[in-house]
Amino acid sequence: MNTRRLTGLDFDTLRAYTDIPPSAERLLSKTEKEISFDLNLVRDDGSLIEADCHLVYANTVRGPAKGGIRFSPAVTLEETRDLAERMVYKTALAGIPFGGGKSGIAMDPKSITRFEKMAVMKEFVHMIDLELKSGAYIPAPDLGTTPYDMAVVYGETHMPESVTGKPPSVGGLPGRREATGWGVCHTTCRAAQEYLGTSPEGLRVAIQGFGNVGSYTALFLAQRGAKVVALSDVSGGLVDDKGLDVPALVAHTQIGNMLDECTGDHITNDELLALDVDVLIPAAIENVLHKGNAAAVQARLLVEAANGPTTPEADAILRQRDLTVVPDILANSGGVVASYVEWRQAKSGSLTDASETYEVIRSRIDLAFDQMVAHVKNHAIPPRTACQLVAAEELVRSMHDRVWI
Ligand code: NAD
């Protein structure tokens, strides 16, 4: 049995709606390449900085492996594989010329100094030098990494197209930082119209996670007139039925703990997930909705801003209850679409402004959303299956064209 197995696609279901040749299924069921290594650095006092690192190429039939560098103590090869696979379907669904990859550094970034983090990033680049300089793997920020870390990658490769998510001052894209949240907001507005028959004005939304994705999602939704009634971070959340003051909370989070802001009542993350709202947006980490709490979800629409927030068991429970789930590979694709625009800018030497970035995200999400809705209607399947169907068809087409199958 192949240990590099991928498990994301439900081929048994998809085969009922499209022709997936056995050879394509085989290629989509395993990773192409995996690199694991130890990263070791010695501090001045003789102590060692040590981390397990992984780089996974899940599938590159549609282009170079695109996917962030995760810097977290929870990083494992299995998690990196799972995240790389999601990138395969996300990029195919968005119709951009990338494949799926991911890398990870198993270390708590908070356990080292800023200078040590820079040294770790440089060593990481050194260890995968060929992958980066050949353009085979194009990283971006993920949990625990920032635009400044991407600037370090660029500083080592001297190739602006070798990494995306850089600060705008060193070839990054205006709007990249906000891009994922902008895309989640746009997807939420489209889904609210399609499945709840409502515009964003007055839409009652709860968002778990107040980092990059959660905070920009909240800001953009509030700008469009939605009522963000609950927000949380790892330490807990705030709820206010009249709507939270999102810009004030964003400003406050930059200088202190969100929960110290005296608006709203304190709630736990579990309570937030069970609130009676129109839309629930998990925007923190994976597997937060599981078989133990899915039945308690009262929202009418779930928009997956985080990668993999819903376990398959929870997904089945939500489906039985007719709750619409917009999957991560569509909802949070704004980030990778913006990365594509940044990569294109780096390769061409052109300049792009934020409004152009948002416009490309809007058009890619609209196209994918329309295809999803068409499949949902034609085949009476859930949005997640519909998105996988669009992506699988795209990948099979690419495999034919490259004579992989
Ligand atoms: P981040 O580190 O900026 O923010 C994460 C937020 O989640 C923080 O507010 C943190 O306090 C909170 N959190 C962490 N653990 C939690 C827990 N157990 N319960 C509740 N809240 C918790 O990360 P991010 O960049 O905003 O990414 C969030 C999710 O979105 C991840 O799944 C990531 O893979 C996904 N994603 C991010 C991007 C991007 O461009 N940043 C793109 C696509 C997908």
Image: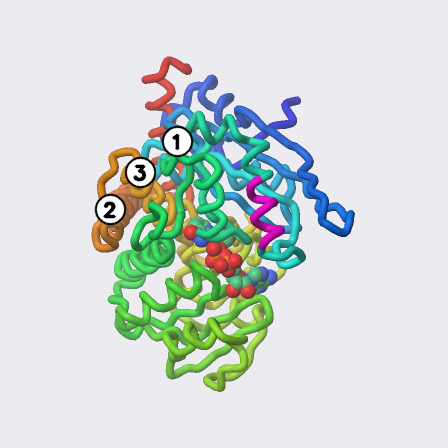
Q: Residue at x 38, y 73 (%)?
A: 228
Q: How is the image coloured?
A: rainbow
Report how many numbered discs are placed on residues in the image.
Answer: 3
Q: Name the residue furthest front.
A: 44
Residue at 43% in and 55% down: 305
Q: Could you say where residue 19 lies in the image, as x and y percent from the top left?
A: 37, 24
Q: Which residue is mark 1?
A: 392
2 vs 1, front mark: 2
Per the image, is 116 magenta?
yes
Residue 117 lies, with reference to residue 302, above or below; the image says above
Magenta residues: mostly which secondary structure? helix
- The secondary element bearing badge 2 is classed as helix
- At label 2, counting other C-alpha atoms closer than 10 Å, the crowd grade (few under 14, some 14-19, many 20 or more) is some
Q: In the visual, does 309 lie left or right of 147?
A: right
Q: Disc 2 designates what residue?
A: 360
Q: Nearer the viewer, residue 149 or 107?
A: 149
